[in-house]
Image (cartoon, grey):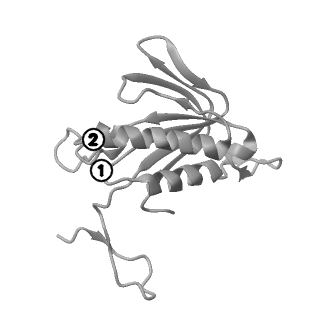
């Protein structure tokens, strides 16, 4: 079976994109508030802004960090004066909470137990998670809330809208 995606357009496009390209994934949720608790006590909290669940795959690199943090920080999903989604988190003065989540790379192709083989090893993913957090702080000009990499975290949020968007560094849509 051919494991490739057909090109979207046939205009001078003769290549295909393999399914197995690494992709840094994020689930972005516009929130009224979000928080992380670890072993009971509150660890990190934000007011209105974005909760970003970030999954790193083997092969991801700084280019993915740069593109994804820029895309998320400039995504216009906050209402303007007319109520239209026309402002970014920066323009809205929102906060960002970033939580690592390797399960975004789950494969459910075989059986009923997800496989996480595509998720990057912590020695690769933790530094990229940290770099993503730094890049996002640079983009929005203030500190971001964070989870603790590899910890068993409890995430609470009040989704606003609801607005929930899945984005990855290879589709670049």
The residue where tag 2 is placed is 121
Residue name at image x 82 percent, y 50 percent: 82
The percent coordinates of residue 94 (x first, y second) are 69, 37
Residue 29: mark in rendering: none
The percent coordinates of residue 136 (x first, y second) are 58, 43
Examine the image and state in which quarter residue 170 appears: bottom left
Q: CA distance from mark 2 to mark 1?
A: 7 Å
**Residue 168 in view here:** no
Check whether the beta carbons of the residues at disc 2 and disc 1 lie within 8 A of each other: yes
The percent coordinates of residue 52 (x first, y second) are 52, 39
Is residue 117 found left or right of 16 in the rendered image? left
> Dot 2: few (<14), some (14–19), or many (≥20) neighbours within 10 Å?
few
> Dot 1: few (<14), some (14–19), or many (≥20) neighbours within 10 Å?
some
Image quadrant containing the N terminus? bottom left
The percent coordinates of residue 63 (x first, y second) are 46, 57
Is residue 154 found left or right of 163 in the rendered image? left
Q: Give the mark, 2 or 1, whose residue is nearer the N terminus.
A: 1
Compared with 160, 26 (above or below) is below
Is residue 82 found left or right of 129 in the rendered image? right
Examine the image and state in which quarter residue 18 appears: bottom left
As helix, strand or loop, the secondary structure at mark 1 comes to loop
Residue name at image x 57 percent, y 54 percent: 71
Residue name at image x 34 percent, y 75 percent: 6
The residue where tag 1 is placed is 58
In front: 159, or 133? 133
Compared with 109, 1 (above or below) is below
Is residue 1 found left or right of 90 in the rendered image? left
As helix, strand or loop, the secondary structure at mark 2 comes to loop
């Amino acid at each position: 079976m051919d494991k490739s995606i057909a090109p979207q357009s046939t205009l001078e496009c003769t290549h295909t994109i393999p399914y197995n390209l690494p992709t840094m994934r994020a689930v972005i949720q516009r929130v009224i508030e979000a928080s992380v608790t670890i072993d009971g006590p509150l660890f990190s909290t934000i007011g209105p802004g974005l909760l970003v669940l970030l999954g790193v795959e083997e092969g991801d690199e700084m280019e993915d960090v740069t593109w994804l943090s820029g895309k998320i920080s400039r995504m216009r999903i906050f209402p303007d004066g007319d109520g239209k989604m026309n402002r970014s988190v920066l323009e809205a003065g929102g906060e960002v909470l970033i939580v690592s989540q390797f399960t975004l790379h789950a494969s459910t192709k075989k059986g009923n137990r997800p496989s996480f083989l595509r998720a990057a090893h912590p020695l690769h993913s933790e530094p990229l998670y940290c770099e993503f957090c730094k890049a996002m702080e640079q983009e929005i000009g203030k500190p971001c809330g964070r989870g603790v990499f590899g910890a068993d975290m409890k995430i609470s949020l009040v989704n606003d809208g609801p607005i929930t968007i899945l984005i990855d560094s290879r589709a670049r849509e």
